[in-house]
Image (spheres, rainbow, N blue to C red):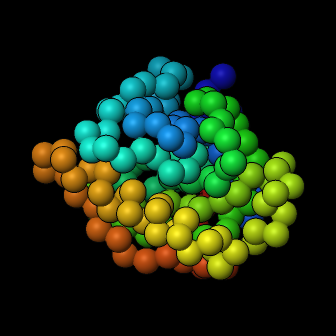
Amino acid sequence: MNLWKDIPCGEKPPRILNMVVEVISGSRDKYEYNVDWEAFVLDRIILSSVVFPVEYGFVPQTWYDDHDPLDIMALSYEPLEVGCIVKVRTIGALIVEDENGIDPKILSVLVDDARFDGYNDISDVHPHKLREIQEFFETYKRLEPHKWVKFKEWKSAKEARNSKLCD
């Protein structure tokens, strides 16, 4: 089964999406799903001392300007598993720019975790958690030659959902 081609974008996109987990929170190992091989490949081990503060992956059947599926993050109380598919609710987006251009990352919460029932917008997330996420993405490439990331802005749930997500 091809996790990018065969899994739908979501139940009610752009509000409720499917997420394929590529990286678990607390990890420095960055895996990427290879659509042709239908397998997860270790892309790199983060060279700096930071770890992913969220679950990280992609939305199936999407494609963004950076020639990759749309990036998505999910808040979770425990690390999930690389390769698992979870139903998530869009609550905002982090917009960064890197050496390849603008790179949006949807922020979401797990639909099937009642502890996130009250999370409907980025304003429902503790400001410190948002700073942690922003700090991670601003610094995780810093020790890699010719790579960089610059924070642009956070977007609300409404703004994130107005983005073109699933075709």
Residue 45 shows up from this direction: yes
Residue 92: quadrant of the picture? bottom right
Q: Is residue 53 above or below residue 123?
A: above
Q: Is residue 147 left or right of residue 161?
A: left
What residue lies at 63% left-to-right and 53% top-to-bottom?
74
Q: Classify 69 as above or below 21.
A: below
Instruction: Look at the picture and state if 112 lies above or below 132.
Output: above
- Provide residue 79's location: percent of width, then percent of height: 63, 38
| Residue displayed at 25% across by 39% down | 47
Q: Nearer the viewer, residue 165 or 94?
A: 94
* Camera-side residue of 147 and 64: 147
Where residue 27 sits: x, y (%)?
A: 46, 37
Picture coordinates of residue 134, whole percent (x, y): 42, 65
| Quadrant into which the N terminus falls | top right
Q: Position of residue 155 (x, y in %)?
A: 54, 77
Quarter of the picture containing the C terminus is bottom right
Question: Is 147 in front, or is 4?
Answer: 147
Residue 36 is at least partly visible in this image: no
Most extreme residue toward the left is 145
Tell me which residue sits at (38%, 58%) in the image.
137
Which quadrant of the figure has residue 120?
Answer: bottom right
